[in-house]
Structure formats: C-alpha cells, structure tokens
Image: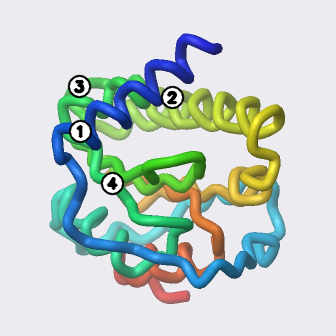
Amino acid sequence: MFKKILVVLASVMILTACGSKDSSKSSSSGSSSAGATSSASESSAVDKTPTVTASPAELTANLSKDIEFTSEMMMVAEEEIGSFIEIDPSIQASLYVVNGGSSDTLAVFRLDDESKKDGLRTAIEGYMANLKENAEYGNPEELPKLEHALVMDYGNYIVWCIAPDALKAKEAINKAFSVQQ
C-alpha cells in the first residue's frame, strides 16, 4: 500500500516538474454538496448511445472547465496513466488529477470493445479502494467525495469523476454527452 502511495506521489511530482500541467484552471468556491446524491457510489448506465465523437482528451479538457474541483486540475500525460490505474493499453484514456492532497479525479475512457468494461470498472474500483483507505488514515475530509464518486457509462465511453459536488458534476457530464436530465 505504502509503495503505491509513493508511486502516485512520485508521478505527480515528476509530472509537475516536467510541466505537464494543463493550461486550463478549475477552481472551487469551497462549498461541498456531495451529500446531494443518495447512493454510496454513483454508478449510472445511460441507455442512449451518445452522439459524442470527441476524444477522451477533448472531453476531459472541456469537463475540467465545467466541473468545480478543490484546486487546479493537472492533466496526466497519456503514457503515465498506467502509473495511476492499470488499464488495457487499447483503451483510449484521459486523466486529470489534483496536484496535492485532494482525491479529485476526472477521467474519460473510450473502449473499442464493450467486453473490456468489466476490467476497467474493476481497475477503477481498486484505485478507489486505495484512495478510501488512504483518506481514512490521512485525509478523512476526502471521504464524502469518495463515497459519491461517479462512474458512468455512455455507450463505449466510461466517465469517472471525484468532485466536491457530485450532483453538479453529473449534470455537466450528462450535458457533455447530450443526455437529458
């Protein structure tokens, strides 16, 4: 467990030192209404196949501007995503994290084969379990965000978001995928 934390921290430090920050900024007003959702972990399957053709990188760049996060989001270089979450190399992915002690996360995955969804969801759940374990001991104020994390299916896309206000994040994500609320 401790090694995994060190790897993540080292990756964030390396990415920051290399200037891999995304130029867009997301800020938060500091308020949290993550309790607005009713389930422990928000997981939604949307029946409609989205008409979205944007890449995961385009979607995360836009969503990082539309969703309020604890502090500035940092884009993880595509070749470094595997340092954070183990996924099939054929899955297109874009991942943003917060540089610091927050668990805020935004990721969009585009799968070429729906049979890979279960493996991806398992990887996300494993990463989330590590985040929760770390938060319990070191940063318990992050637990409400983690309890209301979003993992949502949109056809061949999966969106994963940990944000202070899960309800507003869900609205922004649905809007990006042209899904009616």
For mark 1, give the secondary structure: helix
Per the model, the C-alpha gap separating discs 1 and 2 is 27 Å
> Residue beneath label 2, please?
123
Per the model, the C-alpha gap separating discs 4 and 3 is 21 Å
Q: Residues within 10 Å of mark 3 (few under 14, many from 20)?
A: few
Q: Residues within 10 Å of mark 2 (few under 14, many from 20)?
A: some
Residue ranking furthest to the bottom: 180
Q: Amino acid at mark 1?
A: Ala
Tell me which residue sits at (55%, 74%) in the image.
170
For mark 4, give the secondary structure: strand
Per the model, the C-alpha gap separating discs 2 and 4 is 21 Å
Closer to the chain start, of discs 2 and 4, is: 4
Tell me which residue sits at (40%, 74%) in the image.
26
- The answer to whether residue 27 is above or below residue 44 is below
Is residue 139 toward the left or the right of residue 94 in the image? right
Q: Residues within 10 Å of mark 4 (few under 14, many from 20)?
A: many
> Residue beneath label 4, please?
74
> Residue beneath label 3, please?
89
Closer to the chain start, of discs 4 and 1, is: 1
Residues under numbered marks 2 and 4 in contact, where contact means CB atoms less than 8 Å apart? no
Is residue 122 toward the left or the right of residue 50 in the image? right
Tell me which residue sits at (54%, 74%) in the image.
169
